[in-house]
Image (spheres, grey):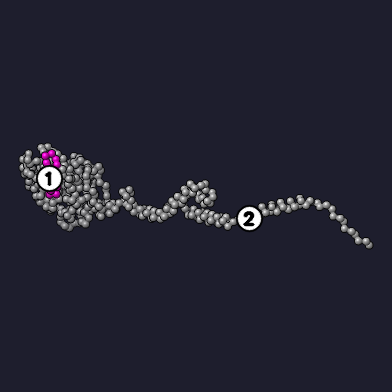
Amino acid sequence: MSEKQPEEAGPPAVPDDVWERFARDSERDIRSSAPKEPSARARLVTERLRQEDARESERASRRIFRRSPPRPVQPEGWRTGPAWREMDGRAARRRRLWAVLGIPLAVAVVVVAMKPSLLPGDPFGTSAEAADPVNAAPLPVETAAPTAPPSAGDSATPTLDRPFAGSPAERWADGAAGIVLPKATPVGSLTEEQVATALDNTKKLLVGANLDPATLRGERPAAAVAVLDPKVPGMIRDVNRWLRAPDREHDPLVLFSRFDPDEARPVGKVVKTRGRITFKAGKNAAVVVHADYTFVYPVTPADGNSTEVARTIVRRVVDVAFSDPRKFQVTPGKVRIVEFSEDIGNSACDVYDGFLHPQFDSTGSPGAAPTGPTTDPYDRSRDIGSATTGGCGTVSRT
């Protein structure tokens, strides 16, 4: 049996050069399509961005009142240039600053909410004076006519320990301290010293007539009478007549505040005072001093068995003149009363015995029933007497 010989190989199906090119292109395509391992810097940047986005999302979830949606933090390469980087840097600093200020600001808001009077100017009307009138600071000196009555204040009832409770006078000055004199200046032929003497004697007249304890007890107002000029015809004579035998036509209450010691006694030693003094040139080489003051008197029944407190309010407007003694027959340093008027709140009607008669709830008033209009005795913005032309009226408060 003879051996079969192998067949001779034919030509290749693919030429060698084509096969080599195919192998080369396939390797290149495989390399280009295979996933590449990111560089260390790329991995670092990606991780940083992921962490910052996560922190930003967490912060945003806690901002209940946030107005705009959170934005992811963008990498450096996405910004458009140095100017934007500078702006972003300033914004970052502002954010850090607000973060630092945020906690103190929040604390301040809470404190003000609890005590609004800490705000300058007290815009909510909750000042310490309104909340605690007992320790409230006195009102500043009145330098011009008020334009409205004082506010109602609290509704507390006056007591022996706090006789001005519930009254605007609680913040008024005490006694003579409320009579503040303006700076004296020369007027006409009168020197500064002479004008100062006229102002001082006007204050002495007011104090002696309205604040002196002896006067308030119904005694002779000697200190007030002492500053009147005895050379003025009839002035001191008339005053003595009023005090000696008072009646409707001769009433000492037109100038002096006096209480019947058998009926009422003062509560404490303080009379509240508010008003102002001005001066100007007058006729016959004189200076005319104009005084407009309100006095508030707390009193209690004189029997000593009651704790009830009532208040009588007296407003007086007095003009006094001081003439140049070198030109007129006057007493140097003395004053003459030119004009006077008064409003009296909480005193008996049609009683002319020379005393104020406050009304106590426990005893009533000894006088006739009031028939005139209702008046606020603390209203210093109105002209004196303008609301009492209808006769003896009532007071809206004491």
For label 1, the residue is 193
Instruction: Using a 10 Å C-alpha cutoff, classify the residue at mark 1 as few (fewer than 14 neighbours), some (14 to 19) or many (20 or more).
Output: few
Residue 196 is one of the magenta-drawn residues: yes
Which-is-in-front pick, marks 2 and 1?
2
Q: Is residue 17 visible?
A: yes
Disc 2/disc 1 C-alpha distance (Å): 106 Å
Instruction: Using a 10 Å C-alpha cutoff, classify the residue at mark 2 as few (fewer than 14 neighbours), some (14 to 19) or many (20 or more).
Output: few
Residue 372 x, y percent position in the rendering: 20, 42
Amino acid type, mark 1: Glu
Determine the image quadrant of residue 40. Answer: bottom right
Residue 189 x, y percent position in the rendering: 11, 39
Please tell me which residue is depicted at 76% across the width and 52% down the height of the picture.
19
Please tell me which residue is depicted at 15% across the width and 53% down the height of the picture.
264
Please tell me which residue is depicted at 53% across the width and 51% down the height of the picture.
75
For label 2, the residue is 36
Amino acid type, mark 2: Lys
Extent of the magenta region: 186-208
Residue 73 vs residue 287: left or right?
Answer: right
Please tell me which residue is depicted at 19% across the width and 41% down the height of the picture.
384
